[in-house]
Amino acid sequence: MAQYDTIFKNATLVNHDGEGLADIAVRGGRIFAIGSVGDSADEIVDCKGLHILPGVIDTQVHFREPGLTHKEDLESGSLSAVMGGVTGVFEMPNTNPLTTTRETFEDKIARATNRMHCDFAFYIGGTHENVAELPVLEKLPGCAGVKVFMGSSTGSLLVADDDGVEAILRAISRRAAFHSEDEYMLEERKHLRVAGDPSSHPVWRSPEVALNCTKRLVGLAHKTGKRIHVLHISTADEMIYLADHKDVASVEVTPHHLTLDETAYTRLGTYVQMNPPVRDKAHREGIWKGVANGVADILGSDHAPHTREEKDHPYPASHSGMTGVQTLVPTMLDHVNAGKLSLARFVDMTSHGPNRLFGIAGKGRIAVGYDADFTIVDLKRRETITNEWVKSRVGWTPYDGVTVTGWPVGTIVRGKTVMWQGELVTPSQGQPIRFLEALVAGA
């Protein structure tokens, strides 16, 4: 009888020891041994010339189910994830109905279990109305924490006022995630939108709109003594400001804010329209500086699909959002190959970082006892990203036609090979991600 279920051999591992050649033995969905492990396994996967990374966890996706499944659902979004090397996702609450009650949250868990292709957690939306329930809701099994929109985006979740945000922070104990744009300033600046001109989007949703809200949020975090996670930082100014407030604030950056700049509006029009917006090169370089100096903690794609019809409405009626979960790994590996960040830093921002910030149980490291979640990549492989490759229901990407160096070739979830060399191998076995702070609560 074989000693292990699977052995991954001849790869370069990237883990707590750095980079080096080692084999990984898997048994019962978990990592059982690392190093020289022999050959006694039901399956041996030869990974010569490849790198095995801890499974990439995308901590911000919008999979649109329930209510908006004409543009994505949990199955199609998670298929896009695993085809891009992503083994786990945190999904957002701005669905229809909103994910703001135990009933709507547990409905999502039921929809996702054994149907999603990757493992998953869901945020609970924080509102004025559900503050009293949040201490219980945030510790439900599979809950990533509380998400609050301080500025309006897709959907109707919004807590614009300081009193409302303070009440939420006082109620909860886990780290909460925030869309940080000042709703009052957005309302005052609506006249700056130019009909038919999406390049006016970052004029309306200016750097000041983001920075002012982030300053308010940090002040409330200090006042209440609570932890905050500021999503999709889009300005150099916020990165400088947040460097002085790392005691309470963790920071997410996105591939599109690190990759695109103001020239994208000429090329892509409304297809680059996001909240907060893609900005000019100076802000992009300021965000890269935050990656280099460690102020930025993690990467999230903010995968937010809309149909072509919705994107083709003339600005400002066009919808804000783009696909991103499938292109996160190849886009960022291309930056690794270009020398913008190290492979170790990429791993820190996509697996170790989520594990550390959110207290994920058993994921985020290649270590004995952890789930056997791996993102297997070929750092030298050159591929061209195309709309046809993207498995999101909407079938488009802002990176269509872009050639990158570095490509995901395998997605392993709890020891099962889900994607290998661009083919779906083992479908639909997704399970809720576990969190230490929920385990402590007995959930």
Image: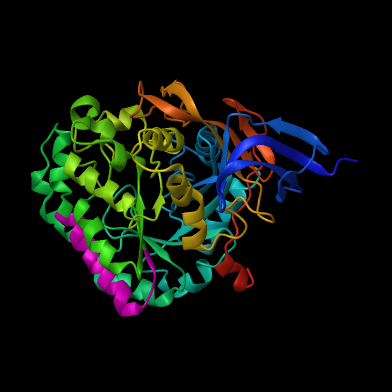
Q: Is residue 115 visible?
A: no
Is residue 287 or residue 171 the one in the foreground?
287
Viewer-closest of 309 and 365: 365
Reply yes or no: does residue 219 show up in magenta: yes
Q: Is residue 369 above or below residue 335?
A: below
Residue 400 lies within the magenta run: no
Q: Is residue 42 above or below residue 151?
A: above
Q: Which residues are magenta?
A: 208-228
Judge by depth and name the residue closer to the eye, 295 or 112. Answer: 295
Report the side of 134 relative to 184 (left or right).
right
Mark count:
0
**In this orientation, does residue 328 appear?**
yes
x then y, percent, for residue 254: 35, 45
Residue 297 sits in quarter: bottom left
Q: Hey, which quadrant is residue 213 in on the image?
A: bottom left
Report x, y in % for residue 286. Answer: 23, 49
Q: In screen coordinates, is 249 left or right of 219?
A: right
Q: Quadrant of the C terminus?
A: bottom right
- Seen at 50% across and 66% down, the residue is 138
Task: From the image, give the main secondary structure of the stretch colored magenta.
Answer: helix
Q: Nearer the viewer, residue 335 or 35?
A: 35
12 above or below 276?
A: above
Residue 265 picture quarter: top left
The picture places residue 354, in percent across and down from the top left corner, at: 48, 55
